[in-house]
Image: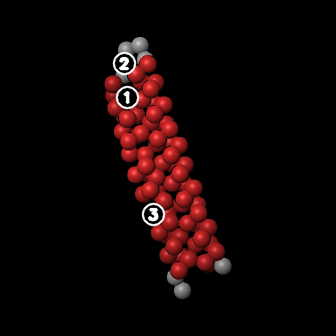
Amino acid sequence: MKRLLGIAIVLLGAAAGVYIGGYLMIFGGGVQFVDALQADPVDSSSAVIGAIRFGFGWMVGWIVFGVIGFIGGLLALWD
């Protein structure tokens, strides 16, 4: 049962990494960047934050997956 719970946590970590890294950071950062550039007075701080979110989204997703997956892997393999 503990092994099954560990595998489920690893899969949850993969899904959380894709959601947070892919959707919130990469997609959200791109939308924020484009919206900031299309504003009447260009909002440079929002554009920079959007570009940073877009650029580092993959890393945030891998960190989330790594931390949650590591915890689930330990739970699955620990006797």
Residue 72 falls left or right of residue 1: left
**x 40%, y 52%: residue:** 59
Measuring from the top left, give residue 63's x and y in whole percent: 42, 57
Residue 1 screen position, x and y as percent: 66, 79
**Residue placed furthest toward the top:** 40
Quadrant containing the C terminus in the rendered view: bottom right
Left or right: 63 in relation to 44: right
Q: Is residue 32 above or below residue 63?
A: above
Labelled disc at residue 42: 2
Q: Dot 3: within a 10 Å radius of its alpha carbon, few (fewer than 14), some, or many (20 or more) residues?
A: some
Residue at 61% over, 78% down: 2
Q: Secondary structure at mark 1?
A: helix
How far apart are the alpha carbons under marks 2 and 1?
8 Å
Q: Secondary structure under badge 3?
A: helix
76 vs 19: above or below: below
Residue wearing tag 3: 67
Residue 38 is drawn in which quadrant? top left
The structure's colour scheme is secondary structure
Q: CA distance from mark 2 to mark 3?
A: 37 Å
Crowding at label 1, few (<14), some or many (≥20) Cα neighbours within 10 Å?
A: many
